[in-house]
Image: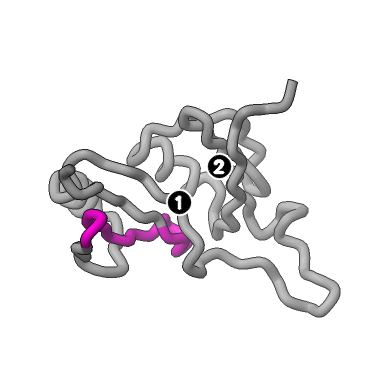
Amino acid sequence: MPDERVNVRYMVDDVETALAFYVQHFGFTESLNAAPAFADVVRGHLRLLLSGPTSSAGRPMPDGRTPAPGGWNRLHFIVEDLAAEVDRLRAAGVHFRNDIVRGPGGQQILLEDPSGNPIELFQPAAR
């Protein structure tokens, strides 16, 4: 039977720091900790693979580029009260890329994990 989990890999600078971040702030459960190279965490059907610079996923490509954290692809969490989540995370010292943006579908904000990987918090518009 195929695994029903969705697997997402994030390159991170420090596996232990990333692991603690996702467990503490977003309710993930540690599944495997092979730091400093790799760890994975689970939340519902989402398995987040945290790959450090010494992991096999961090090896340079044939053209010399090295996988690194950051970019704009992101995890997308739906929340019921965006303002409350932003307040909670700011009080914990989490870095945000922007302020809350409102649109016809709802409101959103981008924050970063300790390696600079983006996470979107989204509150759908009331229907």
Residue 90: give x, y in percent of width and height: 20, 54
- Spatial CA distance of label 2 from label 1 is 10 Å
- Label 2 belongs to which residue? 48
Q: Residue at x 52, y 45 (%)?
A: 16
Q: Quadrant of the C terminus?
A: top left
Residue 6 to residue 13: above or below: above
Give the camera-side residue of 7 and 36: 7
Residue 111 lies in the magenta-colored region:
yes
Label 2 sits on a secondary structure element that is: strand
Which of pointers 2 and 1 indicates the residue nearer the eye?
1
Crowding at dot 1, Cα within 10 Å, few <14 / some 14-19 / many 20+, comes out as some
Q: Earlier in the sequence, mark 2 or mark 1?
A: 2
Give the residues drawn in magenta, as a range.
Answer: 104-118
Q: Residue at x 52, y 36 (%)?
A: 46
Label 1 sits on a secondary structure element that is: strand
> Which picture quadrant has residue 77?
top left
Cβ–Cβ under 8 Å for marks 2 and 1: yes
Crowding at dot 2, Cα within 10 Å, few <14 / some 14-19 / many 20+, comes out as many
Residue 1 to residue 55: above or below: above
**The residue positioned farthest toward the right in the image shown:** 62
Residue 105 to residue 72: above or below: above
Give the camera-side residue of 76 and 12: 76
Residue 120 lies in the magenta-colored region:
no
Amino acid carrying mark 2 in the image: Leu
Horizontal side of 117 relative to 78 (left or right) equals: right
Q: Residue at x 47, y 67 (%)?
A: 72
Residue 25: give x, y in percent of width and height: 33, 41
Give the camera-side residue of 32 and 101: 101
Residue 28: give x, y in percent of width and height: 44, 33
Residue 60: give x, y in percent of width and height: 77, 69
- Label 1 belongs to which residue? 75
